[in-house]
Image: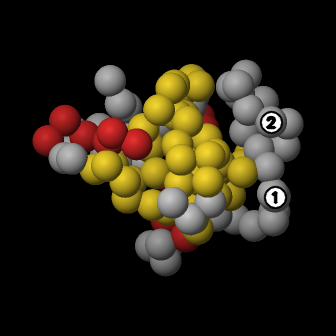
Amino acid sequence: MIHRGGVYEIDFPHAGPHPGVVVTREEAIPVLGSVTIALVTSNRRDHPAEVSLDDDGLDLRAGSVINCDDLATLPKSMVGKSRGYLSPGKLRELNGALAIALGLD
């Protein structure tokens, strides 16, 4: 089952294999054929639309961040193996970074 805040293996069409975090709202996931995913990368830019994943105990490269400026809506069939889930605190950080990335702040 796919969940918001889940970190999954994704083969991004524009970036190749990377982890990604599902950002689609939980209630919509069961009724949609696609989900929106934020790219996880170790290429840090230290800007406010990134969320650090250094201390979350996920199966990720050291220094990884969620890049909320790099979103893709992909079919659920492209969502691969789970690497874990964001903590409630990281989900709050993700919400803030998405608001910045989408100009909602």
Q: Is residue 83 above or below residue 28?
A: above
Residue 95 locus on image (x, y percent): 49, 52
Residue 65 locus on image (x, y percent): 72, 49
The image quadrant of residue 68 is bottom right
Q: Secondary structure at mark 1?
A: loop
Of callouts 2 and 1, the N-terminal one: 1
Residue farthest along the right direction in this orientation: 62
Q: Which residue is painted at 19% across and 35% down in the image?
A: 30
Q: Nearer the viewer, residue 94 or 83?
A: 83
Q: Which residue is painted at 61% across and 54% down in the image?
A: 16
Q: Secondary structure at mark 2?
A: loop
Q: Which residue is painted at 57% across and 23% down in the image?
A: 84
Q: Which residue is mark 1?
A: 44
Q: Nearer the viewer, residue 39 or 76?
A: 76
Residue 56 locus on image (x, y percent): 71, 28
Q: Which mark is residue 30?
A: none
Three-letter code for the amino acid on which mark 1 is drawn: Arg
Q: How is the image coloured?
A: secondary structure
Residue 38 in view (yes/no): no
What is the spatial separation of the Cα atoms under label 2 and label 1, in whole angstroms? 12 Å
Residue farthest along the left direction in this orientation: 31
The image quadrant of residue 20 is top right
Three-letter code for the amino acid on which mark 2 is drawn: Arg
Q: Which residue is painted at 79% across and 49% down in the image?
A: 42
Residue 19 in view (yes/no): yes
Determine crowd level at label 1: few under 14, some 14-19, many 20+ residues with C-alpha closer than 10 A.
Answer: some
Q: Which mark is residue 61?
A: 2
Residue 25 locus on image (x, y percent): 31, 45
Report the mark closest to the observer, 2 or 1: 2
Q: Is residue 88 above or below residue 70?
A: above
